[in-house]
Image: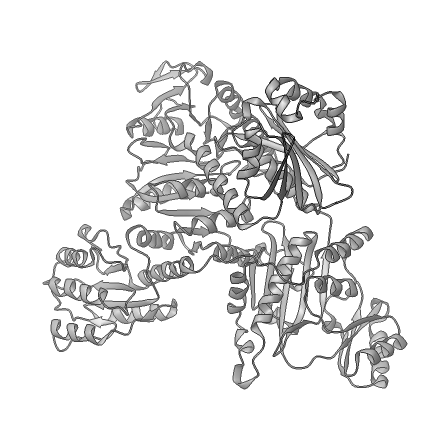
Amino acid sequence: MATYPAHYESDVVLRDGTTVRLRPVRSDDAPGLGELFGRLSDQSLYLRFLGIPAGNTAEIERLVRADHDDEFVIVAEAGGRLRGVASYLRDPRQRERAEVAFTIADALQGRGLGTRMLETLAAIARERGIRTFDAYVSHENDLMMRVFLDSGFQIERQLDSGVVHVSLGLEMTPLYESKAAERSQAAAVASMKSFFDARATVVVGANRERGRIGAEILHNIAAGGYTGRLSAVHPTASSIDGVPAYPRVTAVPDAIDLAVICVPAAAVPAVVDDCIAKGVKALVVISAGFSETGPEGRAAERQILEKVRTAGIRLIGPNCMGIINTDPAVRLNATFSPVTPIAGRVAFSTQSGALGLAILEYVQQLNLGISTFVSVGNKADVSGNDLIQYWADDPRTDVILLYLESFGNPRRFAQIARRVARRKPIVAVKSGRSPAGARAASSHTGALAASDAVVDALFHQAGIIRTVTVEELFDVAALLAHQPLPAGPRMAVLSNAGGPAILAADACEAQGLRLAPLGAGTVAELRLLLPPAASVTNPVDMLASATPEQFGRATRILLGDDQVDSLLVIFIPPLVTKAGEVARAMVAAADGSAKPVLANFLGARGAPPDLAPIPSYAFPEAAVAALARVTAYGAWRRRPTGTVPACAGVEARAARDIITTALARGDGWLPPDEAQALIGAVGIAAVSTRLVSTADQAAAAASRAGYPVVLKAVGPEILHKSDVGGVTLDIGDERALRSAFETMKGRLGDTMTAALVQQMVGGGVELLVGAVLDPTFGPLVACGSGGVLVDLLRDTVFRLHPLTELDAADMVEGLGSVRLLRGYRGRPRADEGAVVDVLLRVSALLEICPEIQELDINPLKVLGRGARAVDVRVRVSRLVVPPSTRQIAY
């Protein structure tokens, strides 16, 4: 049996929140398949096989011997049994079509397993060039027809003698992606309910000795007024502080939704087994001593995850500090934190337990309300992807905060976050910003793809607000939680002191905001309100004598100006004016406004409580920085979502043929002619190029191309031609060409195995366009300054594949060298649209040929009309980079 990539095996969440493992069939699955068919009801057998006897030894033998190419079979495994099987068989006459069939155990029918198997099988088929599935379904099989109709794939149906022939186009259309997102959201919400809406919770490892983790967690749950049933597991006690205790989980008489495990690491596997036997739905493993400790700990963590996934339940942790839900209907504080946050509209997930403790104390000082708090720890199972989807539908959450140290499945994270951020803001701190994590790479694009630049690209595309520090994270959260989004970047500053107002104005310009030009009517009203010495232009300085009434009226006047999108009010307490009175006047004036208001109450006492819900900051710069982040997010939300366009003139089959031919020789770099042909297959124009081995061949090639020409050395050890003297430009005749060839050959010797003769293209702007398959983030597309300056200028923008037309335009807009494209200092303008088109075609090529590991077009000559690739390098590999851990899928 053929091998298959690691990503073909995944654990998926069904619509009821339980998990099932999907994987390709193995030769030892015959007994399990026999049991699956044997347990089917007569009705299921009739509907699956259209009344034809099946499920016999020959059928099973055919399934387990699938070649994983023309015939591919996946099985669903849960609780140690096979619960479903799905297969496709390619049509030998129309190789882009395949017949598909599904068998689902009776107990799992109607729970979304058929849909998940269809999605998985379709993804595998697309990678193998299959574009259409054909299925033959009994007209009585309503469940299977519903799977097809609700899938989002384009469907054609034809009824003949009681059998419906269903054809499914496997293209990932916007309708399919929308349907898949809805299914993912529903499954995530269902799978998280056992954590956040647990009606019965048990603490395993509880004890009477306060100060120990088990005792503190049990105390916090009980003292917090948990509304569900609470029990404890202790080897000898019958009760702990009034909470009934039992020697093991299976001894608890009632059903259990959530188990909080805080026993030594060595005891965790046995406790997990006990929880599975009891039918516990969700686990929070507080215990440390797993993957954070090294190889042995990672192995132990994998074993626990295997148990949990096989049982179809979910796990938070290990090595975490627990979870909190402040919902009055639940009131669950399953952490060992000495601080219980007040209820509010902000959800928070942290990967660091120690930081989580500090954060809970900090939000208490800020008086910032929390809806739910999760310390995910090692993220063995539940990660930010799960939580973001849950919070997207949580009516008690308006703002999502994340502290991230790593990504489990960043591409999936980007897809989910981009969808959710359209409705609810996501603010994140990602640690590890230094360039130490940049990996070695042999192409320009690969070398430039430092990890933090990629994180910036991911967050930018997904609309995530990235902050540098945790303090700034909460500065932004306070604004988002209590104020509307600004409609634009125009800010007004109102102050009773000139110095802080100037600081705010400087920060405004530095952060990309604009001081709003006040309307004539606004200025006139302010002149009537304020003393003659006051400044009524923006920033408005009311002088130290300003009264609470003047603060209130000026606030109302500025918010009424159509030129103002947001307002910062700065108050320095003089001797005669009370801060509380000013705060109440501001709140009354801002009430009902659709514009955000921020405050900066300077002084040792800070802002008075009466200022709520207007957020206050210690210094003007912090307020402006938070406003700038929120303003950029508001602009992102107002933008159209963008679509991945279908580029005209793309010859997918030709591109696939080039890749297939190259891989038949093995992994590595394509010869220059093949690389140029590959980009040509997706419609990227290149300069006329000939690969030659001798001076005579070079002369013949130049004669066909027409002088002037460029001569470039080629060889497996020659990566950067200009560095070794491997480029001669503007060769005007045959004599000069022969001389250049011999000189270059003499200089480089055997490292020069061939040469390129290219048509000389003058003028234009040189850019780099490239792609790299990052082992963590997947395919990335790059655009930057090109030619010999690429490594020097470091002017490169990255985005995750696939690109929408807005992504591509945004990449060009983000270049420092975009001014060159637009006619810097009298130079002719270059075709900016052509660069966008090339970027989109590179993204299309990555979709057609996922075997591409690195691609460089450097330089891309951007001319007055169109763009042409000059040098093209492409590296391909059959190797599929497996994920560091198998992630849950929805």
In the rendered view, would you say 724 is above or below 332? below
Coordinates of residue 7 in the picture (x, y in percent): 64, 41
Coordinates of residue 216 in the picture (x, y in percent): 35, 29
Nearest the eye: 815 or 837 = 837
Question: For the N terminus, which image quadrant?
Answer: top right
In the rendered view, would you say 246 is above or below 822? above
Q: Residue furthest front?
A: 161
In the rendered view, would you say 48 is above or below 298? above
Q: Is residue 707 left or right of residue 122?
A: right
Coordinates of residue 670 in the picture (x, y in percent): 77, 60
Q: Is residue 872 left or right of residue 156?
A: right
> Residue 219 appears in which quarter of the rendering?
top left
* Residue drawn at the location 52% of the way across and 47% of the way down: 175
* Residue drawn at the location 68% of the way across and 23% of the way down: 33
Coordinates of residue 145 in the picture (x, y in percent): 57, 33
**Is residue 717 visible to us here?**
no
* Residue drawn at the location 36% of the way across and 24% of the way down: 209
Nearest the eye: 109 or 209 = 109
How is the rendered protein coloured? Answer: one colour
Q: Residue furthest left?
A: 576
For the image shown, how many numbered marks are present on the structure?
A: 0
Nearest the eye: 232 or 62 = 62
In the rendered view, would you say 295 is above or below 700? above
Q: Is residue 140 left or right of residue 426?
A: right
**Is residue 665 visible to us here?**
yes
